Image (cartoon, grey):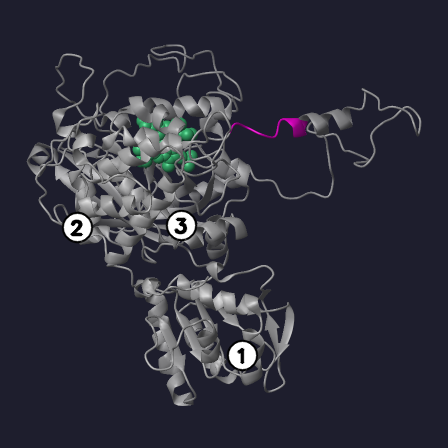
């Protein structure tokens, strides 16, 4: 492909490519028209009435206007992705901040400031297309770079490890996770027998399970979620020097999670919570951003690392190999059309460009087959690379031909190589030095259907993850295991899981078992089961602090949402000051009241209301602000929705700021904030001079996001 690319195009500056994909897409976009036509372009005179034999007679088969419309409608659906069916996407660009020429010859990574257009699709793994966004799941994080040397896809996820080591087990894993075949339940959830049956028999899944049961599986926003390439890929530079590379996407807004109960409630209140959040942020110009980091290990030194880079159930702690920032990803444009772009985009981990190559990771190797294969079924034929969203910016030319949905019109007699008939001279592509060279691996081995013994350590990194979590994060992991296993109906499966967990940490296993009416976790029973292999490696680290989001939680507060609860008689003087400070930090406030319209303030002004209790709840906000005003607080105190709003925010450990009499509402909620307010609760009695500092403390509390110490307080919400 690269060999037939016109030189003129190859020489365009990388920086010019910023809007190139958008321009390419514009050639295919359609604006709304005032005339309706059939699919053949014939103007439709009447779009309300079919053609019938007389006013009260049957419809005529000759009504091609009706047939065109009905038939086209009946074919609107394509199969959803067999996994990662539910997703949302956005356009943007990737910009190099640190050129990587020393490690890779990939053209798009050579120049600081060079921009490459991208399309990104986020997804949940298990749920079907119409499932909820906030379910407990790892998320897909797939990035298509439209580079000048062809498309490069980094098809990653929100955890750095996967459940299995070999592609052979992928259909089993997914069959166990997806709804059970007899009754088609549950939707978008791992909390059921078949999933836990399978993973309890596959100890290699333990490390990924720890991630799945942790707060990582409940992102507050896709904009606040980390991404990972999982597998080690390989960079090769112009001199043929090879490095293994692991990719990391780090959100500029920090890493933040939902509370598990909150996530479940949001799934009912707003199943589109994450996609709406992404869409709204981009639409309002708050362009989400991630830093791309790489961990590089020289190929010759991989063995000395003590972690098998080909094992996708292992990560490389960044305390051992630092993550070097090399670029930034900015999402700045919502798609024009969900189906044409987000649904039809087709990723593939084997879409690599010169300078980047795959590794022998046996999971990755299987993916190299699976993605094209599943696009063939999903997108109906081999020409899906011609769909506008998938088209490379690099010119593609080859002799693959025909097939369903072919759009290009290749000219000439020749669709084979070598030839002399194409351009009148001999054309032969045979061992050139351009384009994708691939790394020359000296392979000589007997075929073997077995795993490397280096893959046998199934628990030490699960233990590392557990050791690295903060106290609240550990509580959440325990609660998540309890919740999931309590939904498992077969006691023997629950027992197997806790027996396995005893190999991660005995206290963890005991705590999980506590509420499940199980026998004491028995590590020996686990070790005696078929398939159990444990060559526990010596941990180079006791804990890896970078794995905890609790430890690194403070971050920018821009785009967080604060609910301001109001009722008639609200005092808005202090409120305005706090709102102003919040706005300066990019925090949005929404006025929430018992009804839409306006609320009369204590000074007789009309305060417009943004949303009412009938359609919203505290779980849709990051923090709550209750202004002062005696009658307003009294009215809120008599409104069960308002009291519940505050209680629930308290329970979910969110920052709460109360001004003046607002503190009474907290008391009703059982929270005495008079003397020493609990963590994350900010109280201003009457002193007007204290308002700006109060607002600043509130901003700092929002920056911390959750005040988990409050978790210990029992709250009736
Ligand atoms: Fe995928 N995966 N996968 N996967 N995967 C698909 O491809 C598959 C794996 C990931 O937004 C499918 O086009 C196999 C790991 C993402 O369009 C399918 C194996 C990781 C997406 C497929 C894996 C992923 C997919 C479904 C093991 C994290 C969504 C339709 C050998 C690094 C991309 C499709 C999008 C999608 C197969 C393992 C991430 C069936 C066989 C590990 C983000 O081809």
Which one is closest to the eye, mark 3 or mark 2? 2
Badge 1 crowding class, 10 Å Cα cut-off, few under 14, some 14 to 19, many 20 or more, is many
Badge 3 crowding class, 10 Å Cα cut-off, few under 14, some 14 to 19, many 20 or more, is many
Q: Where does residue 695 sit, x and y in percent of width and height?
A: 39, 77
Range drawn in magenta = 72-79
Q: Which mark is residue 633?
A: 1
Residue labelled with disc 2: 544
In the rendered image, is residue 5 in sight? no
Residue at x-position 54% and y-position 28%: 78
Q: CA distance from mark 1 to mark 2?
A: 47 Å
Instruction: Mark 3 and ligand 1: say if the CB distance to the nearest ligand atom is below 8 Å.
Output: no
For the residue pair 243 and 400, the one nearer the viewer reads as 243
Residue labelled with disc 3: 222
| Disc 1, SS | helix
Q: Where does residue 630 sit, x and y in percent of width and height?
A: 54, 84
Residue at x-position 61% and y-position 61%: 614
Q: Is residue 75 magenta?
A: yes
């Amino acid at each position: 492909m690269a060999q037939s690319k016109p030189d003129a195009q190859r020489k365009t500056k990388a920086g010019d490519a910023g809007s190139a994909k958008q321009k390419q897409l514009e050639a295919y976009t359609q604006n709304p028209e005032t005339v309706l036509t059939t699919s053949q372009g014939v103007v439709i005179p009447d779009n309300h009435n079919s053609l019938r034999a007389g006013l009260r007679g049957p419809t005529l088969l000759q009504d091609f206007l009706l047939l065109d419309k009905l038939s086209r409608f009946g074919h609107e659906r394509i199969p959803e992705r067999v996994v990662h069916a539910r997703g949302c996407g956005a356009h943007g660009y990737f910009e190099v901040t640190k050129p990587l020429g020393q490690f890779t010859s990939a053209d798009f990574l050579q120049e600081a400031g060079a921009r490459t257009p991208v399309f990104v699709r986020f997804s949940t793994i298990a749920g079907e297309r119409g499932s909820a966004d906030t379910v407990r799941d790892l998320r897909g994080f797939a990035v298509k770079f439209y580079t000048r040397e062809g498309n490069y896809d980094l098809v990653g996820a929100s955890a750095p490890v996967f459940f299995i080591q070999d592609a052979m087990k992928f259909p089993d894993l997914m069959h166990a996770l997806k709804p059970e075949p007899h009754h088609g339940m549950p939707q978008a959830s791992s909390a059921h027998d078949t999933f836990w049956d399978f993973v309890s028999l596959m100890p290699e899944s333990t490390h990924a399970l720890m991630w799945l049961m942790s707060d990582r599986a409940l992102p507050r926003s896709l904009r606040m979620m980390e991404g990972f390439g999982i597998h080690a890929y390989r960079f090769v530079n112009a001199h043929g020097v090879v490095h293994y590379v692991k990719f990391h996407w780090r959100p500029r807004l920090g890493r933040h999670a939902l509370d598990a109960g909150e996530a479940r409630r949001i799934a009912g209140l707003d199943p589109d919570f994450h996609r709406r959040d992404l869409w709204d942020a981009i639409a309002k110009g708050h362009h989400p951003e991630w830093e791309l980091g790489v961990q590089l290990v020289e190929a010759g030194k991989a063995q000395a690392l003590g972690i098998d880079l080909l094992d996708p159930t292992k990560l490389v702690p960044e305390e051992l190999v630092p993550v070097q920032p090399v670029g930034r990803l900015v999402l700045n444009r919502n798609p024009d059309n969900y189906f044409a772009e987000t649904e039809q985009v087709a990723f593939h981990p084997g879409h690599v460009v010169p300078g980047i190559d795959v590794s022998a990771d046996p999971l990755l190797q299987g993916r190299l087959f699976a993605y094209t294969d599943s696009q063939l079924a999903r997108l109906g034929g081999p020409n899906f690379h011609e769909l506008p969203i998938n088209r490379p910016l690099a010119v593609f030319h080859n002799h693959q031909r025909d097939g369903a949905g072919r759009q290009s019109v290749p000219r000439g007699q020749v669709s084979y190589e070598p030839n002399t008939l194409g351009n009148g001279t001999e054309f032969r592509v045979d061992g050139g030095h351009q384009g994708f060279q691939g790394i020359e691996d000296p392979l000589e081995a007997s075929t073997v259907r077995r795993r490397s013994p280096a893959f046998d350590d199934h628990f030490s990194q699960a233990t590392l993850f557990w050791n690295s979590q903060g106290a609240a994060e550990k509580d959440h992991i325990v609660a998540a295991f309890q919740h999931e296993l309590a939904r498992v109906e077969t006691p023997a499966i629950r027992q197997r899981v806790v027996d396995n967990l005893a190999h991660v940490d005995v206290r963890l296993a005991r705590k999980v078992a506590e509420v499940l009416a199980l026998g004491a976790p028995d590590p020996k029973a686990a070790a005696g089961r078929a398939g159990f292999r444990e060559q526990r490696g010596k941990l180079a680290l006791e804990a890896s602090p970078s794995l905890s989001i609790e430890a690194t939680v403070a971050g920018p507060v821009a785009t967080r949402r604060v609910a301001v609860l109001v009722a008639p008689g609200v005092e808005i003087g202090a409120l305005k000051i706090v709102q102003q400070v919040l706005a300066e930090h990019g925090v949005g406030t929404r006025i929430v009241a018992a009804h839409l319209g306006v609320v009369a303030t204590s000074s007789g002004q009309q305060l417009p209301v943004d949303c009412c209790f009938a359609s919203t709840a505290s779980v849709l906000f990051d923090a709550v602000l209750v202004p002062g005003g005696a009658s307003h607080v009294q009215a809120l105190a008599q409104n069960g929705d308002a009291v519940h709003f505050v209680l629930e925010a308290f329970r979910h450990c969110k920052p709460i700021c109360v001004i003046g009499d607002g503190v009474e509402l907290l008391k009703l909620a059982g929270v005495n904030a008079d003397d020493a307010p609990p963590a994350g609760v900010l109280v201003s009695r009457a002193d007007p001079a204290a308002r700006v500092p109060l607002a600043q403390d509130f901003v700092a509390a929002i920056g911390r996001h959750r005040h988990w110490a409050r978790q210990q307080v029992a709250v009736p919400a």
